[in-house]
Image (cartoon, rainbow, N blue to C red):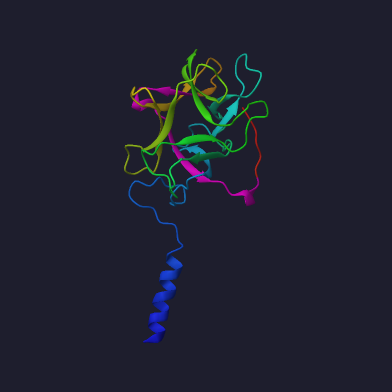
Amino acid sequence: MKSTLFALFLLCALTSYLPSATAGDVVDTDGNPVENGGTYFVLPTIILNGGGIEYATFGNETCPVTVAQSRDQFCKGFPITISSPARIRHISEGLSLNIGFTFASPCSPASEWTIVKDQPEGLAVKLTGFKNTVPGVFTLKRVPADEIIGYNILFCPLDNNPCGYVAVHFDQFRNRRLVVSEVQEDGLWVMFQKLSYASGLTLSSA
């Protein structure tokens, strides 16, 4: 009897430390809940649809401040930190979020994503530092496909305008710039792969 109780106690002790996702939790590619403040590669859920998310220099820019999707499907992009000011362990759908690169661009004052208006491509996703930014927060929403574990990244302005979907805008050189679109079908479907520092890290930009 004592051995049985001890076995049950040991099982409970071990399983209490295993990550478990609850309804509404955002999960990574391993099926574990995405951690508040965790670092991930943001990858497309559909293969042959570009690579991960990175910052790059386009047009007349002298500093890589544009958030874009790599054209190389084998490139994971740059590590991204997803965080909420809420004192919670895991990220859930609909939660107000800050999203930014874990490592800042050498010439940018900050690595957080922001939305900049009056750009040729529309509402553009850029790094912090522009004057004509749109105040708001990011959030995550499960894509409408039961057979796919993927998410849309949404941007919700603070002026009560509807949330928009982070999407890809192809410029004349086929660069994949990230923008905000009102059309749900335009939204980029992404998944989150937890960064493993043991695997090494190489930063490269398009």
| 186 horizontally vs 42: left or right | left
x, y percent for residue 65: 59, 24
- Compared with residue 133, is residue 204 higher up or lower down, i.e. above or below? below
The residue under the point 65% across, 43% down is 201
Give the vertical position of 80 relative to 176 (above or below): below
Task: Indicate whether residue 123 is drawn in magenta.
Answer: no
Magenta segment boundaries in residue numbering? 178-200
Please report the residue visible at 62 percent of the width from the left and 49 percent of the height from the top.
Answer: 197
**Magenta-span inclusion, residue 184:** yes
Q: Does 15 sit above or below residue 196?
A: below
Residue 96, position as x, y percentages in the image: 41, 36
Give residue 148's position: percent from left, percent from top: 37, 42
Seen as rendered, the residue at the extreme bottom is 1
**Depth order, front residue of 135/48:** 135
Q: Nearer the viewer, residue 157 or 67?
A: 157
Q: Residue at x 32, y 37 (%)?
A: 144
Relative image position of residue 171 (x, y in whole percent): 52, 17
From the image, which quarter does the C terminus lie in? top right
Q: Is residue 14 left or right of residue 62?
A: left
